[in-house]
Image: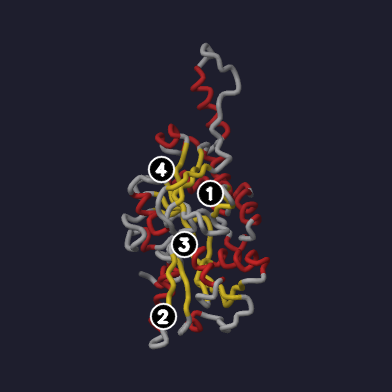
Amino acid sequence: MTARFTRRHSARRRLGAAGAIAVTGALLLTGCGDQTDGAEGGGDSVEQEEKENAAPLFDALPKEIQDAGVINVGSDIAYPPIEFFEGEELKGIDPGLAEAMSEQLGVELKFHDATFDQLVIGLNSDRYDIVMSAMTDTKERQEGQSADAEGGADFVDYFKAGSALLVEKGNPEKIQSLEDLCGLTVAAQRGTANEELLKQQSEQCGDDEIKSFIADKDTDSVTQLQTGRVQAVITDFPVAIYNEKTAGGGDRFEVVGDQIDAAPYGIAVSKDDTELRDAIQQAVQAIIDNGEYAEVLKEWNAEAGAIEEATVNAGE
């Protein structure tokens, strides 16, 4: 495991394909012209032609995805502002980008809620077509050398972020860096690079080791901080900033210290599915080029994580 991986969260987390959530904006269009049975070429050909005309990357998709009209997306949907439920509505950066991508691809991107450390396993067992869940692209994940990425995956990189320290407003413990966590109780999410970062720092603390609270969901980590059971949370930088600005009207938490080792988030695709991987890469690049990508990031105050080129397997 490289130092880079230990400083970035295992791209995010949660199991069980409960509750499929369809991202709006998918262009599964029916023919708008002559739809009678006797129309030249038939209704099916008209529908297919309109899909292709409306969605420039439809032909880039594998035939089975074209026929199904859907890309099933594994995601850990409890990670605002990346992806989260507000009531029954799915919101966040990833759903917004997926909606824009669906317009390029001409198929629906349907999100399925799952535990983070099971997402790549679900991908490689054909439960999902892709994983989009603030997952950090690392060599270990690419090669299947991390516990949460059995079988490995390819990653289309679409955002960049690091870890951060979230503390109580006013920073009563005067925390400014990882070294200041020694002797404290600190939370992180299970199966993530944030958890690994916490473990490594605790080993460096000697007898004054960190007392760890490892949560199944990142929101549980934040709850522990809110109730005073932990003195800090290690989470992704955009997630920390979101909690700083929104919790208690901005009066509950604050982010301290610098962002730790920013690295790319990647959309995971099976190594056997290079055609889908390349289509996803083209879709990400298309929304970067047409400005929709920037609009989504601006909506969530996440412009700092923007990239200019959708790369593949650029993580270290």
- Judging depth in this view, the residue of 116 and 261 nearest the camera is 116
Quick check: can you spot residue 4? no
Identified by mark 1, the residue type is Val
The secondary element bearing badge 4 is classed as: helix
Mark earlier in primary sequence (2, 3) = 2
Q: Amino acid at mark 4?
A: Glu
Is residue 298 placed above or below 30 in the rendered structure?
below
Which of labels 1 and 2 is toward the front?
Answer: 2
The x, y position of residue 135, in whole percent, is: 46, 59
Callout 2, which amino acid? Answer: Ser
Occupied quadrant, residue 117: bottom left
- In the picture, the quarter occupied by the C terminus is bottom left
Residue identifier under label 1: 284
Q: Could you give the CA–CA distance between mark 4 and mark 2, rounded to whole angstroms?
A: 43 Å
Label 2 sits on a secondary structure element that is helix
Query: Alpha carbon of mark 3 to alpha carbon of mark 1: how far?
Result: 27 Å
User: What residue is rendered at 63% in x and 54% in y?
Assistant: 294
The residue carrying mark 2 is 202
The percent position of residue 241, horizontal first and vertical second, equals: 60, 67
252 vs 164, nearest the viewer: 252
Residue to which mark 3 is pinned: 217
Q: Is residue 109 left or right of residue 96?
A: left
Q: CA distance from mark 2 to mark 3?
A: 21 Å
Image coordinates for residue 303, horizontal then vertical, percent:
62, 60
